[in-house]
Amino acid sequence: MKGLLTLATLIAFQLVPIAHGEEINHTFHCKIYASEGWQKCGFAQKGDLVKVIAHGSWKYGFFSASDANGGGGWGVLLANCPSGALIASQDFEHGVCYRKGMAFRALKSGSIYFRINDPDDELYNNSGYIEIEVEVSE
């Protein structure tokens, strides 16, 4: 099932501390819509450092609203990541959760995808978007 991420696959992403003073090779700005599945925003070469900053809020379900950090409960797509949180993946098997920022090393060369941590069959009642800035450096 495309889009289902587990804790075991989350661990495969190499989380890194956010450092300052690194040369940024590419910056991408995108709107990630809560009512859509995986959405492409940027690309990275294998091993590149990818940092994400998010702004705004969206609604998931008819009544729950959150920023990129998510709301209550745990998500279905990415275990141990709150429902409504922003998540990222390059291959739809490994993923990383936005938690007051996001930084990881790219597992492979290619596009980077983002979405809300909410199952595909529940996207219909979501609304709004999160604006993200994706910085990629070597």
Image (cartoon, rainbow, N blue to C red):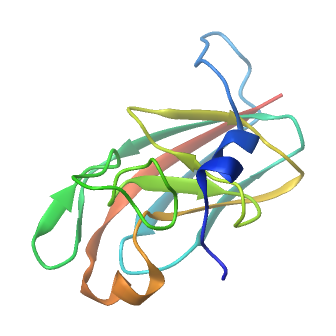
- Where residue 59 sits in the image (x, y, percent)? 21, 68
- x and y percent of residue 2 in the render? 66, 79
Q: Quadrant of residue 88?
A: bottom right
User: As drawn, is 130 to the left or to the right of 132?
Assistant: left
For the point 68% across and 40% down, the residue is 11
Judged left or right of residue 118, residue 29 is: right
Whether residue 104 is situated above or below residue 75 in the rendered picture: above
Residue drawn 45% across the image and 65% down it = 32
Near-viewer residue (133 or 4):
4
Residue sitting at 43 percent across and 63 percent down?
117
Question: Which of the pair 134/6 is nearer the observer?
Answer: 6
Query: Measured along the vertical axis of the image, is residue 125 above or below residue 27?
Result: below
Q: Quadrant of the N terminus?
A: bottom right
**Image position of 85 (left or right of 53):** left
Instruction: Give the residue at the far top of this rendering.
Output: 21
Residue at far left of view = 63
Total count of labels: 0
Q: Dividing the image into 4 quarters, which one contains the C terminus?
A: top right
Instruction: Give the x, y percent position of residue 21.
Output: 65, 10
Name the residue nearer the viewer: 47 or 22. 47
